[in-house]
Image (spheres, rainbow, N blue to C red):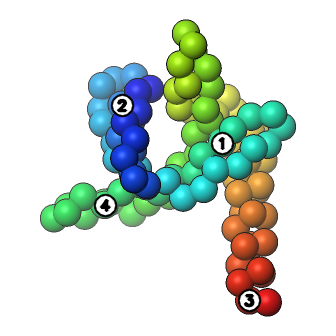
């Protein structure tokens, strides 16, 4: 995947050449790997289908000396990383409430 950074939004291109704009929410380090959480960005004048509104988690990997974003390798990895992001989110909310 190729990425273009700008503010909190990136455009990623999948293996089929389709481009998607994502809004970066958070980054965590877990088990020696960097993971980034995104929500699909809503395009002006377009409604995003409900099934596409979920959290998107990608990992930063090195390929040919470049850092790129990649999908996760398994459902187990996805579940574990999702749980880590939720712990982080709730920890931040608890700090704000204190």
- The quarter holding residue 84 reads bottom right
Question: In the rendered structure, which disc, 2 or 4, sits on the residue that comes first in sequence?
Answer: 2
Q: Which residue lies furthest to the bottom in this view?
A: 98
Q: Name the residue under label 1.
A: 35
Q: Nearer the viewer, residue 85 or 63?
A: 63
Q: Name the residue under label 2.
A: 13
Q: Residue furthest right?
A: 31
Question: In the rendered structure, which disc, 1 or 3, sits on the residue that comes first in sequence?
Answer: 1
Which label lies toward us, 2 or 3? 3
C-beta proximity under 8 Å, tags 1 and 2: no
Q: Where is residue 59 in the image (x, y as percent from the top left)?
A: 62, 35
Q: Residue at x 16, y 64 (%)?
A: 45
Q: Name the residue under label 3.
A: 97
Q: Name the residue under label 4.
A: 42
Q: Which residue is drawn at 53% across and 19% down?
A: 66
Query: Eyeballing the image, is 28 above or below 60?
Result: below
Q: Position of residue 76 (x, y in %)?
A: 76, 39
Quick one: label 2, few (<14), some, or many (20+) residues within 10 Å?
A: some
Which label lies toward us, 4 or 3? 3
């Amino acid at each position: 995947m190729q990425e273009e950074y700008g503010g909190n939004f990136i455009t990623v291109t999948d293996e089929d050449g389709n481009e998607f704009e994502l809004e970066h929410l958070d980054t965590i380090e877990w088990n020696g790997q960097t993971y980034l959480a995104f929500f699909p960005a809503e395009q002006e004048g377009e409604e995003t289908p409900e099934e596409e509104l979920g959290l998107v988690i990608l990992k930063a990997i090195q390929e040919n000396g470049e850092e790129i974003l990649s999908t996760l390798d398994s459902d187990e990895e996805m579940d574990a990383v999702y749980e880590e992001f939720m712990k982080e989110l709730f920890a931040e909310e608890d700090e704000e409430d204190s």
